[in-house]
């Protein structure tokens, strides 16, 4: 394989050329209510060639047969020369030659499809057993193993094995026209052993959907809010992480005005960043999709903006260093600036102390989605609880948090000592590339004066 790719590179006339090639075998099983909807195994392979010409721009081609690689490298060069000169430069990156192989406890490729179907069915039955009000369920099992090759004209060659297993559960409950939904998932870059043992997770989805039928909508207003680790991780990823991606900053004048290095965003307790080098997480790879080694990148340090995320191209444009954040969802797409494992660093306050002096507040848990527009955001929590006189009390629903990112960051006045990485399924979307595997991590986060949307009672 390496020789074939090297021979194709040698024929390129471009100033810079790179090739990514992938072989992927994947299984997907889907139960919907009481019916098996999908049980598939797919084998796919393909590659992409990118050529950069100083008197032109980027030329990009994709292909599905290895024997065609040399022709598509030439096509990428011709595409690049057809463009008007764009003066694209790449920040320097040390060439590497490396192989990253994994050892799976139980290789899912050797597990029969009927066992994977059986496992998804077992989890589905757990949700169906959570009560007569359960009217719909979705139980998903999936696994993928990708053999990944990367080579460029600067001397880098990387081979990496990329495994992942995932289980995903959605339960829908209905009573007298009231419909509620709850979901849970788990995903891990590992073997089949990580797919088992999640009956409690499936039960949690089913029981919470039923409990939400009895939960009243929250009363809208301003509250001191404590985010659980899941929602805090989503918040830092969605509301702040995307703003820190340098391609967005470079191309958006408003973002440049907002994201000035050295700007104070919060109190000294606040440290946040992105780290693609943490072992065992979905966003982790030793190198990004430009062959740059991943690392821990602080974005906020003691409340101050200290960094952003880069590809080699954006780093050169902004006279900064690459951070290992050029990522592509697969061979069909070029790498763009993406997060890996985004985090708020651990605090020092026990959870009981975090809520102890809150007379009336909200404990907001997990995420049902949201949207951001520059510094403004809106997130729907999966559910919530009223905090009353320092205690977690009754469940509430329809908890929507909204506000200005920078005001909200400044209002963070407490961080728990309960940090954890959220190892769930799904992924991040950007520029049509979805779902990119990422991980988010955070402790419980206390924020004062948060706007909560809800019904006025």
Image (spheres, grey):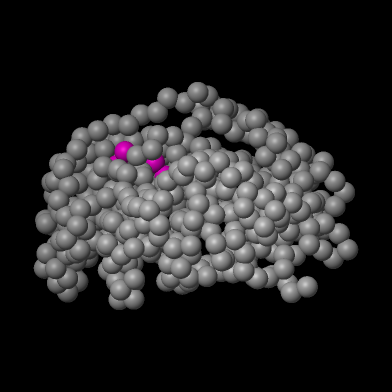
Q: Is residue 349 visible?
A: yes
Q: Is residue 285 magenta?
A: yes
Instruction: Out of 389 and 429, give the one closest to the viewer.
Output: 389
**Residue at x-position 24% and y-position 61%:** 314
x, y (%) of residue 126? 76, 39
Above or below, 37 relative to 224 = above
Query: Which residues are the magenta region?
Result: 283-287
Q: Is residue 58 left or right of residue 192?
A: left
Instruction: Out of 337 and 39, give the one closest to the viewer.
Output: 337
x, y (%) of residue 439? 47, 46
x, y (%) of residue 168? 62, 45
**Residue at x-position 26% and y-position 42%:** 293
x, y (%) of residue 334? 32, 57
Instruction: Out of 407 and 167, give the one closest to the viewer.
Output: 407
> Which quarter of the rendered picture does the N terminus lie within?
top left
**Residue at x-position 44% and y-position 49%:** 344
**Residue at x-position 27% and y-position 62%:** 262
Instruction: Out of 357 and 155, give the one closest to the viewer.
Output: 357
Numbered label tally? 0
Q: Is residue 372 visible?
A: no
Q: Quadrant of residue 398?
A: bottom right
Q: Is residue 184 magenta?
A: no
């Amino acid at each position: 394989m390496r020789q074939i790719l090297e021979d194709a590179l040698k024929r390129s006339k471009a100033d810079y050329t790179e090739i990514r090639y992938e072989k992927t075998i994947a299984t997907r099983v889907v139960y919907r209510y009481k019916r098996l909807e999908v049980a598939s195994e797919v084998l796919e392979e393909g590659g992409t060639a990118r050529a950069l010409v100083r008197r032109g721009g980027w030329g990009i081609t994709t292909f599905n047969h290895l024997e065609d690689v040399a022709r598509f490298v030439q096509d990428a060069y011709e595409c690049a020369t057809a463009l008007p000169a764009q003066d694209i430069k790449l920040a320097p990156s040390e060439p590497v030659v490396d192989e990253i192989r994994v050892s799976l406890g139980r290789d899912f490729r050797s597990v029969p499809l009927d066992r994977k179907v059986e496992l998804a069915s077992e989890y589905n039955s757990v949700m169906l057993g959570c009560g007569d009000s359960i009217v719909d369920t979705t139980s998903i099992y999936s696994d993928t193993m990708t053999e990944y090759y990367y080579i460029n004209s600067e001397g880098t060659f990387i081979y990496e094995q990329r495994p992942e297993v995932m289980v995903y559960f959605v339960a829908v409950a209905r009573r007298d026209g009231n419909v509620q939904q709850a979901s849970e998932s788990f995903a891990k870059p590992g073997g089949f052993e990580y797919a088992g043992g999640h009956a409690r997770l499936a039960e949690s989805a089913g029981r919470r959907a039923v409990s939400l039928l009895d939960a009243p909508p929250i009363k809208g207003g301003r509250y001191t809010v404590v985010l659980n680790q899941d929602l805090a991780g989503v918040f830092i990823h969605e509301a702040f992480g995307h703003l820190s991606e340098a391609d967005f900053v470079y191309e958006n004048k408003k973002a440049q005005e907002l994201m000035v290095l050295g700007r104070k965003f919060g109190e000294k307790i606040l440290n946040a960043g992105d780290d693609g080098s943490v072992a065992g997480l979905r966003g982790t790879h030793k190198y990004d999709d430009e062959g740059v080694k991943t690392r821990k990148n602080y974005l906020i340090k003691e409340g101050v903006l200290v960094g952003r995320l880069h590809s080699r191209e954006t780093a050169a444009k902004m006279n900064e260093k690459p951070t290992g954040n050029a990522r592509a969802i697969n061979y069909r797409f070029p790498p763009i600036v993406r997060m890996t494992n985004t985090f708020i660093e651990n605090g020092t306050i026990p959870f009981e102390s975090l809520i102890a002096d809150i007379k009336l507040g909200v404990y907001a848990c997990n995420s049902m989605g949201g949207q951001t527009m520059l510094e403004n955001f809106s997130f729907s929590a999966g559910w919530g609880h009223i905090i009353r006189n320092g205690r977690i009390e009754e469940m509430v629903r329809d908890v929507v948090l909204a506000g200005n990112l920078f005001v909200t960051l400044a209002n963070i006045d407490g961080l728990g000592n309960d940090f954890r990485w959220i190892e769930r399924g799904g992924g991040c979307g950007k520029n049509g590339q979805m779902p990119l595997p990422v991980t988010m991590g955070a402790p419980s986060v206390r924020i004062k004066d948060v706007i909560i949307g809800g019904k006025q009672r």
